Image (spheres, coloured by chain):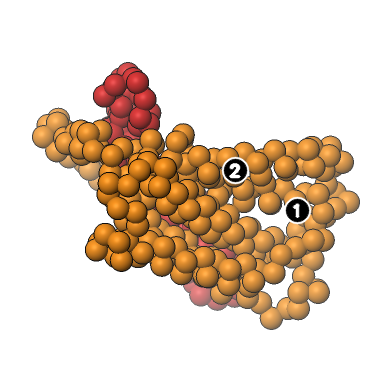
Chain colours: A orange, B red
Amino acid sequence: MSPLIRRISLVLLLGFILFVFITSISDFSTIYNDDGKLFYYANGFQDTGSYNYVTGIYLDYRLFDSLFEAAILLIAVAGVMLISEHSIDEKNATFMLDKQKTPELFITFSRLLYPIMLLFGIYVIVNGHLSPGGGFQGGAIVATAILILYYIDITKTVNVHVVLTIEKILFIVLVLTASLSYLTRGVLFTNFFRLDASLDQKAIFLTLMNILIGAKVSLGLVAIFTAFLKEGR
Amino acid sequence: MNPILSFIVILVGIYGLSVSKNIIKSVFCITIVEAGTILLFLNLGAYEGGVIPILSSLGIEIVDPIPQALMITTIVIGSTITSLALMLCIKIFHHYGSIEWKVILKGDK
C-alpha cells in the first residue's frame, strides 16, 4: 500500500471520528450540567475556607487526586534520574551551556531578574488560596528562577540525588499532613481543622499544603532540568 | 471557543503521531493532543461573560472550577511525560545514532 493511500485513509478515519463527535456534541447540555459549580458556589467557601475555588477543590475536596499527582511527578523525576545514569564520570561530562558563549547581557539581566522571580514565585505559592495561583504554578515559577542561576554561573550545580531524597521526604510529609484529618475529622485526606473552624485556621492548612507542594514541584523541575543539562555532552 | 475546534486540535495531534518519521516530532504531537484535551475541558464550564472562579462581589457569573482543577493535574503530568520521553529520546540517540523511526525499528546500530 502506497503512503498516499495510507494517509488518505487515515484522514478519512479521523474525519469519521470528528463526524461522530459533532453529532454527539449536539446534545451537549444533556451531558454537561453545572450542578457541581452551583454546589461549590454555595458550600465551597464555608467548607474549605478558600477564596479561590480551584485551590479549594484540589486541596480539600480532591486532595486524593493531588497526592497522586505529586506522586506521579516524583516517579517521573526518579525515572529521568534512572534513565540518565551513565557510566562516564561526572568530571568528563562537560556542560551544554558554555560560560564563554553566554552573552554578557543575559548574565546581567539574569542577576537583576533572579530575586524578583523568586519573590514572585513565593508570592504566588503563599497566596494560592486568595488569588490565582497555588503550589503547582508557583513551584514552576520558583524552579524557573533557580534555573536562571545556570546562566549566571554554569559551574555551580546541584547534586540531583540529594534533591531527589529531599523530594521523597517532602512527599512523605505531604501524605502525613493530608492524613492528619483522620485524627480530627475521622475522614482521610481533607483539612485537619474541624469543619466549624474559623477561616484563618483553615487558611493555615491551605498555605501549608501549598508551600509543601510548591517546594516539591520546584525541586522536581530543577532536578529534571539539571539531568538534561548534564546529558548535553 | 467551540468544543469542535479543540477536538480538531486533538485529531491533528493524532494525525501527526501517525505520520511523523522522527521521535522528537512524535513527542511534540503528544503535547499537541494534551493541549487539545486541556482546551476541550476548559471549554466545558466556560461561557461568554464568565469570570474567574474566585469569591468576589461579582456574583454567580463564575466559570466552572472543576475542569480547571482537573486540568492542573493534566498540565503537570503532561510536562513530566514530555521530560521523560525526551530523556528516552536522548538515550535512543546515543544507542542507535539516529532518531528516525525507520532506523530504530530496524534494530541495527
| Amino acid beneath label 2 | Gly
The spot of residue B100 in percent (x, y) is 54, 60
Q: Residue furthest bottom?
A: A87
Q: Residues within 10 Å of mark 2 (few under 14, many from 20)?
A: many
Residue at image mark 2: A121
Q: Considering only order in the chain, which callout, 2 or 1, is on the residue closer to the N terminus?
A: 2
Give residue A233's position: percent from left, percent from top: 74, 65
Whether residue B9 is visible, yes or no, is no
Identify residue type, mark 1: Tyr
- Could you tell me which chain the residue with mark 1 belongs to? A
Q: Is residue A5 above or below residue A116?
A: below
Q: Is residue A124 left or right of residue A205?
A: right
Residue B90 point in image, percent of width and height: 60, 64
- Near-viewer residue (A25 or A46): A46
Residue B85 versus residue A208 in the image, above or below:
below
Which element type, helix, strand or loop, lies under badge 1? helix
The residue under label 1 is: A150
Q: Secondary structure at mark 2?
A: helix
Q: Quadrant of residue A124?
A: top right
Q: Nearer the viewer, residue B46 or A46?
A: A46
> Residue at (85%, 49%) from the top-left corner?
A101
- Residue A162 in sight from this viewpoint: yes
User: How much space separates mark 1 and mark 2, taking CA atoms?
Assistant: 18 Å
Residue A162 falls in image quadrant: bottom right
